[in-house]
Image: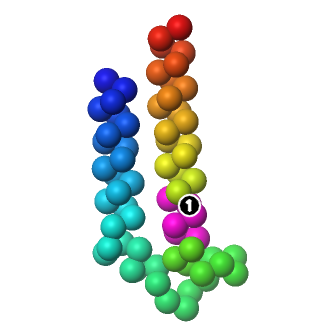
């Protein structure tokens, strides 16, 4: 079950970071003074870390 969740999370974040979606944020727009593309990539990256941490933590507490 844990492997399936991790693999599906990988597929979701891979799809989010693939070609068409990040190009939407390329341009002159900014978010709090940060270029929109960099902000988007950072938020997706941070979201991936949080999601992975939650999955691993739940699995660890269930196995104990």
User: In which image quadrant can residue 6 be found?
Assistant: top left
User: Residue at the location (69% across, 76% down)?
Assistant: 32
Quadrant that contains the N terminus: top left
Q: Is residue 21 left or right of residue 38?
A: left
Outermost residue to the bottom = 28
41 versus 56 height, above or below: below
Nearest the eye: 42 or 32: 42
Q: Is residue 53 left or right of residue 18?
A: right
Q: Is residue 40 magenta?
A: yes
User: In which image quadrant can residue 17 be found?
Assistant: bottom left
x, y percent for residue 58? 50, 23
Outermost residue to the top = 64
Q: Which residues are magenta?
A: 39-44
User: Residue at the location (36% across, 72% down)?
Assistant: 21
x, y percent for residue 12? 34, 51
Predominant SS along the magenta part: helix
- The kind of secondary structure element at disc 1 is helix
In the rendered image, which residue does mark 1 sit on?
43
36 versus 57 height, above or below: below
């Amino acid at each position: 079950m844990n492997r399936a969740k991790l693999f599906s999370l990988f597929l979701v974040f891979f799809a989010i970071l693939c070609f068409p979606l990040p190009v939407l944020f390329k341009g002159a727009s900014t978010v709090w003074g940060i270029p929109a593309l960099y902000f988007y990539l950072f938020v997706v990256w941070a979201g991936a870390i949080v999601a992975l941490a939650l999955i691993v933590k739940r699995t660890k507490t269930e196995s104990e």
